[in-house]
Image (tube, rainbow, N blue to C red):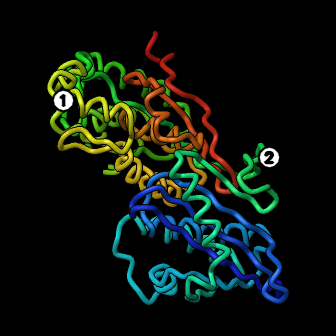
Amino acid sequence: MSGRKLVVEADGGSRGNPGPAGYGALVRDALTGEVLAEVAESIGHATNNVAEYRGLIAGLRAAAEIDPSARVEVRMDSKLVVEQMSGRWKIKHPDMVPLALQARELAEGLGAVSYGWIPRNRNAHADRLANEAMDAAARGEHWVRRVEDEPGEPEPPPAPSASTPLTTVLLRHGETPLSVEKRFAGTTDAPLTGHGRAQARAAALALKGRGLDAIVTSPLARCRDTAAEVAAATGLDVRVEDGLREAAFGEWEGLTFAEAGERWPGELKAWLASPDAAPPGGESFAHAARRVRTALDKLKVRHRERTVLVVSHVTPIKLLVATALGAPLPALYRMHLDVGSLSSIDWYADGPATLRAFNDVHHLET
């Protein structure tokens, strides 16, 4: 084992908690103090704790790239993260569990990792990086900083990854009576139509030879029934993930776009202009993005390097696509997704994600 010792300094934060969020991390040589790696990223809308954990994960990953056998000392000004990762405090919030698991997995691959709290004024470098990332998130930009980059410059095209990705095959549920009439259907538990069941069976046939390892679905009936058709064709079990449910449309549930516009013209205009705006009594896209990101983190931990079918809805699938592309949330307004369609994303542990297919409906045309 290498006798080299590295120091990881990490930080993260959000403007509003939750709000525009980002993290920063760097790796130093413990003997010389030389900065060996530096990374920061804007992560959209998130809480302070999520951003802090993302900073820790990025710092551990950077240390592993330098020397996977090194002894690492992590220094953070987040007492919560330090105490939880040291095993002295329990992790109670469900959003933190998959992030902590990911950090522990990275730590287990290193020679040894210890955690220590430092005051914010001694974490100034990581704090500066995190603030640059938060500034970018507040502008609606996906921004990444690497040690070899000039500050604020676009990230160079990544080299092809040598790792095996997690592949998510994304299936939008089949047709429902509300989708036929183009009505808002968020938490409304609308059933599949006969045509919708036929679409689900067609998708099941198309997926039978795709080498699926698992099926995960939204808890809503239209997705569970669609997933059941694929399960019958592949012999796989189905696991329900609540974070993959559709956004709640509140008072607009069951209404057409025109009907919502007649009753709530100002609210509809605001909803179309900003992902932070929510329908009356409903959920904003920004809020939905947080739970979808948590669901994605769980998939990455539970199904690493496997192929998983995710049966979900328009909003969660678009959010996953936007995340993969590093696109801001307003990009959701520029995507179209048909019922019964298939999309596919490869998520690499050591590099950016790759969108391999979007809104494929060839299996429905036979």
Q: Quadrant of the N terminus?
A: bottom right
Quarter occupied by residue 11: bottom right
Element under disc 1: loop
Residue that sits furthest to the top in the current view: 366
* Residue position for label 2: 159
Question: Which of these two is toward me, 334 or 94?
Answer: 334
Element under disc 2: loop
Q: Which mark is residue 264?
A: 1
Q: Is residue 205 visible?
A: yes
Amino acid type at image mark 1: Trp
Question: Which of these two is toward me, 44 or 344?
Answer: 44
Left or right of 163? Residue 291 is left
Q: Residue at x 67, y 85 (%)?
A: 73
Numbered disc in front, either 1 or 2: 1
Amino acid type at image mark 2: Ala
Task: Give the percent coordinates (x, y) of residue 148.
Answer: 82, 59
Question: Which of these two is toward me, 217 or 366?
Answer: 217
